[in-house]
Amino acid sequence: MSSPPNAATAPVNISPYDAEARFRQVRIVRHDNAVITEPCGIQAQFEVLVEQHRPGTDLHDPAQVYWVDRPGEWTGI
């Protein structure tokens, strides 16, 4: 049986939700192993960022995208 996905193995990681923060930090390990960290405030921005730096990523696959908590929720203040 395989282990559940976690921040150490998923190439895309989204920081914890904070209702008072304007953004969640998104960390992406690109196919060339470069690491990109950028803030995102809305889902559309997240989707563009991931497609730009890690094309072909299935945003619904927990082995590829790890949410610390509250998947799919953005503050977008």
Image (spheres, helix red, strand yellow):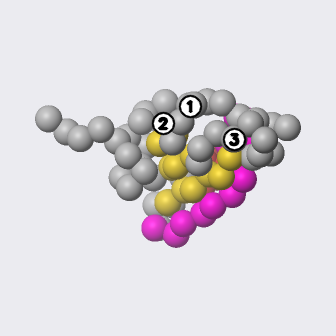
Horizontal and vertical percent for residue 41? Answer: 76, 42
Q: Which residue is mark 2?
A: 58
Residue at image point 69% right, 57% down: 38
Camera sees residue 45: no
| Residue 67 x %, y % | 52, 40
Which is closer to the viewer, label 2 or label 1?
Answer: 1
Residue labelled with disc 3? 18
Q: Which residue is mark 1?
A: 71
| Residue 30 relative to residue 9: left or right | right
Please provide percent x and percent y for residue 54. 54, 52
43 in relation to 28, above or below: above
The stretch in magenta equals 33-47
Outermost residue, right side? 77
Upstream in the sequence, badge 3 or badge 1? Answer: 3
Badge 3: how crowded within 10 Å, few (<14), some, or many (20+)? Answer: some
In reply to whether residue 40 is colored magenta, the answer given is yes
| CA distance for labels 3 and 1 | 12 Å
- Quadrant containing the C terminus is top right
Contact flag, marks 3 and 1 (Cβ < 8 Å): no
Q: Residue at x 62, y 51 (%)?
A: 26
At label 2, which amino acid type do we have?
Answer: Asp
Give, as a three-letter code, the residue at label 1.
Pro
